[in-house]
């Protein structure tokens, strides 16, 4: 694509939704297109199992892989406690359908959860979920 000035125009890319906004069921990939030549292919294609991850979950997966599965390294990179890193990883596994969320080995106390919110390591929503599990 070019603008009238002759310079290439940047193409904005958005994440494809993974769930139907009407019924909530998983969307199927039906059409693929080439942004360069305009070729389109239609059919029902298998979706990428990682495409439904949001940016935070994708970052968690990237950090986990780059640290070769060392949750202590994940903890340091994300700036969270070890139990929080384990919880986020367990939630990622659950979303990918790789098993039930195991209970963290070291459960956080209410005070530790509030401390993590104060330090910015946990969001208020994450803290609320942890506190309801106590």
Image (cartoon, rainbow, N blue to C red):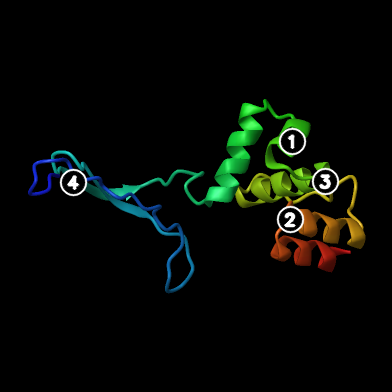
Q: Which residue is mark 3?
A: 83
Residue 32, horizontal then vertical, whole percent: 26, 46
Closer to the camera in the image, 115 or 106? 115
Where residue 40 is drawn, which disc sits there? 4
* Residue lying farthest to the top in this orientation: 68
Q: Which residue is mark 2?
A: 122
- As helix, strand or loop, the secondary structure at mark 1 comes to helix
**Dots 2, 4 in contact, CB < 8 A:** no
Q: Which residue is mark 1?
A: 76
Whole-Å distance between the Cαs marked 4 and 3?
A: 47 Å
Whole-Å distance between the Cαs marked 4 and 1?
A: 44 Å
Closer to the camera in the image, 52 or 31? 52
Residue 74, horizontal then vertical, whole percent: 71, 36
Crowd band around label 2 with a 10 angstrom C-alpha radius: few (<14), some (14–19), many (20+): some
Whole-Å distance between the Cαs marked 2 and 1?
A: 14 Å
Where residue 113 is drawn, which disc sits there? none
Crowd band around label 3 with a 10 angstrom C-alpha radius: few (<14), some (14–19), many (20+): some
Q: Tell me what residue is drawn at x 65 percent, y 47 percent.
A: 92
Whole-Å distance between the Cαs marked 2 and 3?
A: 11 Å
């Amino acid at each position: 694509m070019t603008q009238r000035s002759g310079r290439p125009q940047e193409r904005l890319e958005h994440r494809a939704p993974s769930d139907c906004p009407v019924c909530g069921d998983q969307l199927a990939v039906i059409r693929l297109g080439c942004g360069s030549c305009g070729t389109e292919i239609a059919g029902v294609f298998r979706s990428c199992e990682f495409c439904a991850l949001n940016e935070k979950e994708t970052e968690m997966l990237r950090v986990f892989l780059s640290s070769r599965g060392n949750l202590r390294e994940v903890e340091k990179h994300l700036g969270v406690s070890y139990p929080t890193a384990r919880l986020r990883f367990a939630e990622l596994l659950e979303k990918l359908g790789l098993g039930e969320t195991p209970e963290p080995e070291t459960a956080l106390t209410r005070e530790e959860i509030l401390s993590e919110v104060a330090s910015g390591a946990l969001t208020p929503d994450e803290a609320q979920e942890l506190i309801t599990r106590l």
